Image (cartoon, rainbow, N blue to C red):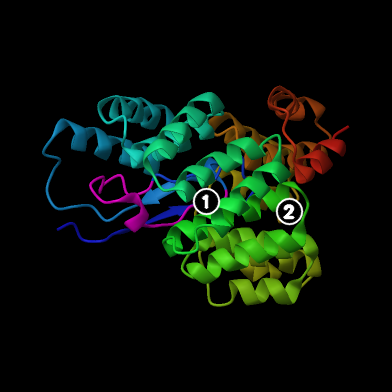
Amino acid sequence: MVRRRKLVVFALGGLGLAAALTAAALVAPERAIDAAATYVPGDPSTVVAHVARRGGPPTTDVEAIRARALQATAQRDWVTARRELDALVTRRPDDARAHLARAVAATTRADYAAARESCTAVARVAPALVGATCVAPLDGLAHPREATAALGAVLAASGAADPGLRAWAEATLGALAVQSDDTAAARAHLATALALDPADDAVRAALADVELATGDGAGLETVLAGHDAPALVLRRALAAKRSGAADAEALAGHVREGRLPARDEARFALAIDGDAARAVKLAAAAWMAEPTLASARMLAEAASEARDAAAAAPVRAWRAANHVVDAPLDRALGAVP
């Protein structure tokens, strides 16, 4: 009997969702997907899967492909992950987990047609909430309010769903609310997701970003108290820098000692170091590797501060091509000269 494992998918760097998908339990395809404890955060651009490995090397070709896909996903090597996942779904066309992971890789590289193809496959074989949550962020790129209504209806009808799946859906709804500038709804959905899984640092970071955006210092401290992951300390450092708190420099030093993804490094460079030129370089690198909504927001913010219209051009083109509706991105691009 396969021991129940929990997959944690971290989206360090906060929300800004173009899609909220999961590479859920690639190591345990034989389980029913609705029995898995899964968590899916708001931003697949930085999905990193951490899964307890089964003992011993892979014993079949399919297991070997699955292992390579998981390793590539953990390393954010999306080209390799996509190649392995394409091979995996060819061999296992009804493997919902493989299709979910493929949707992650495709979305992260802005291949929305492939992501939608995999979500359609998921909808054929998985519970309704899984399929609905897979496709909601894709629909939500251009129509966040409509996607919110559709997913909300499925979630309301899925009261007995696994808590991990409900947390995924709530986190997705929170991300869509951020796109629509509905702060109250974003806070409520993310808080619900975090209550379902208090160990979820990605949702915690996303909720912290909502509190940062509203200037709710007390709310931010409540969300972050007792948590010291670098991405979470970054949120505290940002708040401390903004308010001129006595521990601002100490917090910034603590963040420097950790390791952040390029997009969060850009955020640090921009808001803590005040180095807009470096922030643009870091944000542009993050965008090239992972052209997602979160990366688009960061590059637009950096370009605005650096007064660098050329840096924001790829984001403008992506937004126009995909008819993206996102209030934070609109504000950031509106400030670019």
Q: Is residue 267 above or below residue 124?
A: below
* Magenta span contains residue 37: yes
User: Is any atom of residue 119 visible in this view?
Assistant: yes
Q: Quadrant of residue 329?
A: top right
* Magenta span contains residue 67: no
The residue to which callout 2 is attached is 271
Residue drawn at x 77%, y 36% as measured from the top left: 303
The residue to which callout 1 is attached is 11
Magenta residues span 24-42
Q: Position of residue 258 (x, y in %)?
A: 50, 58
CA–CA distance in space, label 1 to label 2: 20 Å
Q: Which mark is residue 273?
A: none
Q: Quadrant of residue 327?
A: top right
Q: Position of residue 94 (x, y in %)?
A: 31, 34
User: Is any atom of residue 36 visible in this view?
Assistant: no
Which of discs 1 and 2 lies nearer the camera? The answer is 1
Q: Position of residue 21 (x, y in %)?
A: 49, 44
Residue drawn at x 61%, y 52% as measured from the top left: 153
